[in-house]
Amino acid sequence: MMIHRIRRGDTLPTLRATLTGQDGAAINLENSTVELHLARAGRVVVREAVILDAAKGIVHYEWSTADWEGEELSVGSWRLEWQVSLDTGDVITSPPTGHDVLEIGEDLA
């Protein structure tokens, strides 16, 4: 389990991950799309991720100021996963078991 941290309103650091399958090997992301899924208290937030290195399974999500408008992403602990839609039509989720965590901290100003 990986724990990521960001303060509400910040645009750095980006979320970055190497996506792996059940066997621990990197998922080949050639011709695929990837979504970031965040879940908390019965709510799911979905964002489009960027593939940095398809062969090595490396993706990231760049925060924008729009992510923090309203209360969609509130302060607290969120479960995090990456959903890959392969060009074959198959879908695979990383991590393959459990979830990573995103801790969103309160911005004091």
Image: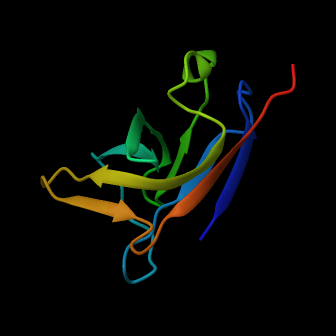
Residue 69 image-quadrant placement = top right
Residue 54 image offset from top left, x and y in percent:
43, 52
The vertical placement of 70 against 82, above or below, is above
Color scheme of the displayed model? rainbow
Q: Where is the C terminus found, in terms of image quarters? A: top right
From this viewpoint, which residue is outermost toward the bottom? 23
Q: Who is closer to the viewer here, 83 or 19?
A: 83
Q: Where is the N terminus found, in terms of image quarters? A: bottom right
Left/right of residue 27 with respect to residue 53 in the rendered view? left
From this viewpoint, which residue is outermost toward the right? 109
- Residue at 39% x, 41% y is 43
From this viewpoint, which residue is outermost toward the left? 89
Residue 92 image offset from top left, x and y in percent:
28, 62
Q: Who is closer to the viewer here, 63 or 78?
A: 78
Residue 20 image offset from top left, x and y in percent:
44, 69
The vertical placement of 97 against 3, above or below, is below
Give the tally of numbered discs.
Answer: 0
- Residue at 42% x, 34% y is 47
Left/right of residue 36 with respect to residue 91 in the rendered view? right
Residue 57 image offset from top left, x and y in percent:
46, 59
